[in-house]
Image (cartoon, grey):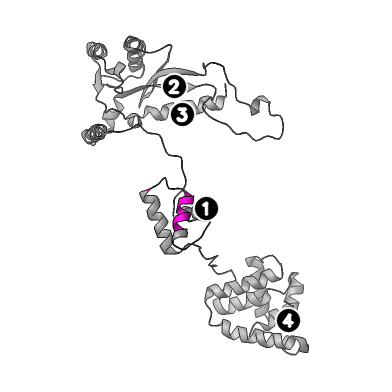
Amino acid sequence: MSNQHAVLWSPLYDSHYKRAEIRGTLLKGVILISACYLYKRHLSTEAINQSDSKLSTMTKTKELSKDVRDKIVDLHKAGMGYKTIAKQLGEKVTTFGAIIRKWKKHKRTVNLPRPGAPCKISPRGVAMIMRTVRNQPRTTREDLANDLKAAGTIVIKKTIGNTLRREGLKSCSARKVPLLKKAHIHARLKFANEHLNDSEDNWVKVLWSDETKMELFDINSTRRVWRRNAAYDPKNTISTVKHGGGNIMLWGCFSAKGTGQLHRIKGTMDGAMYRQILGENLLPSARALKMGRGWVFQRDNNPKHTAKATKEWLKNKHIKVLEWPSQSPDLNPIENLWRELKVRVAKRQP
C-alpha cells in the first residue's frame, strides 16, 4: 500500500494531501478505501487491531516503539504533515495513519489486545476432553483426538496437548506407589486421625529410620549429554560394571535435630543383622543428636523389623516405637533425605 493510501484512510488527513493530484488509476481504490473506513467505524476493537496489523505487515516494517508513536502524535498535534514527521524522525510514513487513528479514537498509541487465532476445539469439545481426562487420566492424546473426530471435530494430537495445557494440565510420568488394600487404607487413615493434632514438639522427638539401595553407576537410568564429538570423553560417558556391584544397601536415621549414623549393609540382612545394626548405630545416633528422654523410634513393618526377637530387643533397651501403618513409605520423611543423597551421588558421577 502506498503512502497516499495510508493517509487517505484517515478522515482527518492533512490538507496538504487534499490538494495532491491523484492519478485516475488510483481513484477507484481511494473511493473503496473511504467506503471501507465508513464501515470500519462500526467494527469492534478486535477488528480494528486486525486491520491495523495487516497495514503494518503489508509494508514489512518493524513495529514502532511507544516512544516513537508518542512523538508522531505530538508532532501531528503540532501541525506537522506526515512527510515532515517522517523526515524528522527518520521513519517511514506507512503506519502513521494507523497510529494517528488509534490515538484519535482510543486516546492511546499502544496496541490494543489482539484476539489471536480462533480455537479449533469448541468450548463443548474442550469440556468433553476435560471430562474424559478427569475420569481416565491415562487417556492418550490419540484417544482424545478420536473422540473429537467421532463428534465431528478433526484436530491433530498437538492441538489436544495445547488445549490441555491451556486448561492447566501437563503430561507427567505416573508415580510408582505401593499397592494399597482396604486394610492398608484403613490403617493409614487411623494413623492420620491419631496424630492429626500432634504438636511440633511431638515430631521433634521422633527418630526416623529406613533402608535404601544406592545406585553408584546409574545402571538403571539413561543420561543425555550435550556434545559435538568426543563421545568417549569421560564427561560424556556413564561408567558401568559387570555382574552387578553397581549398588550398595544402606541403613540410616535422622530427626529434626539432624542426621544420625549411616551404615552400609553387607550381604543379605536378616533379623539378627538388623538388631546388630540397631545396637551399633541407633543408640549412638540418639545420643549424638541429643534426643533426650522420651524420644520415639520409627521403623516400618518389614518382618525383620517386627520380629519377636527385635521387639524384645527394643523393649529391653527401653526404646519406645512409633506404631506404623503397613505399605506407607511415602509417609516417612526420610524418603526425602534418601532422594537428596541419591541426587548428590549422581552429580558426583563416581
Q: Amino acid at mark 3?
A: Glu
Tell me the SS state at disc 1.
Answer: helix
Residue at x 58% of width, y 31% of height? 223
Residue 132 relative to residue 98: left or right: left
User: Is residue 141 in the magenta section?
Assistant: yes
Q: Earlier in the sequence, mark 4 or mark 1?
A: 4
Say if mark 4 contacts mark 1, CB within 8 Å. Answer: no
Residue holding disc 4: 4
What residue range appears in magenta? 136-148
Separation of residues labelled 4 and 1 (CA atoms): 47 Å
Residue holding disc 1: 157
Q: Amino acid at mark 4?
A: Gln
Q: Earlier in the sequence, mark 2 or mark 4?
A: 4
**Predominant SS of the magenta segment:** helix
Question: Residue 31, image x and y in percent?
Answer: 67, 88
User: Is residue 46 in the magenta section?
Assistant: no
Separation of residues labelled 4 and 3 (CA atoms): 68 Å
